[in-house]
Amino acid sequence: MREIVYYVHQSVDGYIHGANGEFDWAQMGPELSAYSFELTERAGAFLYGRKVWDLMSYYWPRAESMSQDPHDLAFAPVWRKMPKIVVSRTLTEAAEGARVVGGGDLAAEIGALKAEPGKDLLLTGGSKLAAALTGLGLIDEYAIVVHPVVLGGGQPVFMDVERLGLRLAESRTLDARSVLLRYRRGQ
């Protein structure tokens, strides 16, 4: 059975973006970039909610013309090749060859994806889909990178989630700046 790994960047005060949607504070140093590629190697597909999909599908096909960041330049071709799944109640199709699911029973649809053969599903960014999948008990691992910034408001990482017991699997400092907290579901 494939697992779902939720990979997210957050501020010290628990937000994924600021009050105006800003995400200009997460810095991808060499160690964090290497960790991102470790997660990507475990993945058989990227999993996105619709809003994050809109951002990803705009940026990554054009990354080389929009950025000179070494991580972006190395990751863009990987992103283009990786199978992508978008969970949406409103989309019926998506660009970049992405598969769209979410028109029916979310638990059944995501459970079927997990049951397919292959590598894990990497859910990145966003919090609405993560909250829904957390509530259904479908996320197996949480890879949370805490960046040294306090945003004072915005969208929280965990929205509308009941109490959740997690087990620390790993913690480490990345680039002498950020902290990776990797948790598994359960006590």
Image (tube, rainbow, N blue to C red):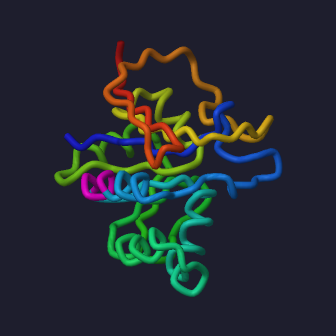
| Residue depicted at x 37% and y 42% | 5
The image position of residue 130, as x and y in percent, is 52, 39
Is residue 104 rendered to the left or right of residue 119? right
Q: Quadrant of residue 58?
A: bottom right
Task: Check the image and report above or below for 56 versus 166.
Answer: below
Is residue 127 rendered to the left or right of residue 4? right
The image position of residue 178, as x and y in percent, is 52, 42
The image position of residue 160, as x and y in percent, is 64, 27
- Quadrant, the C terminus: top left
| Residue depicted at x 29% and y 55% | 43
Residue 122 on the magenta segment: no
Q: Quadrant of residue 76?
A: bottom left
Is residue 81 rendered to the left or right of residue 150? left
Task: Check the image and report above or below for 49 versus 143.
Answer: below
Q: How many marks?
A: 0
Residue 39 on the magenta segment: yes
Q: Residue furthest front?
A: 176
Residue span colored magenta: 38-43
Q: Nearer the viewer, residue 162 or 43?
A: 43
Task: Check the image and report above or below for 175 versus 171.
Answer: below
| Residue depicted at x 73% and y 37% | 150
Q: Residue furthest bottom?
A: 65
- Residue 128 visible? The answer is no
- Quadrant, the N terminus: top left
Q: Main secondary structure of the magenta part?
A: helix
The image position of residue 172, as x and y in percent, is 39, 35
- Residue 187 visible? The answer is yes
Q: Nearer the viewer, residue 141 or 178?
A: 178
| Residue depicted at x 60% and y 31% | 158
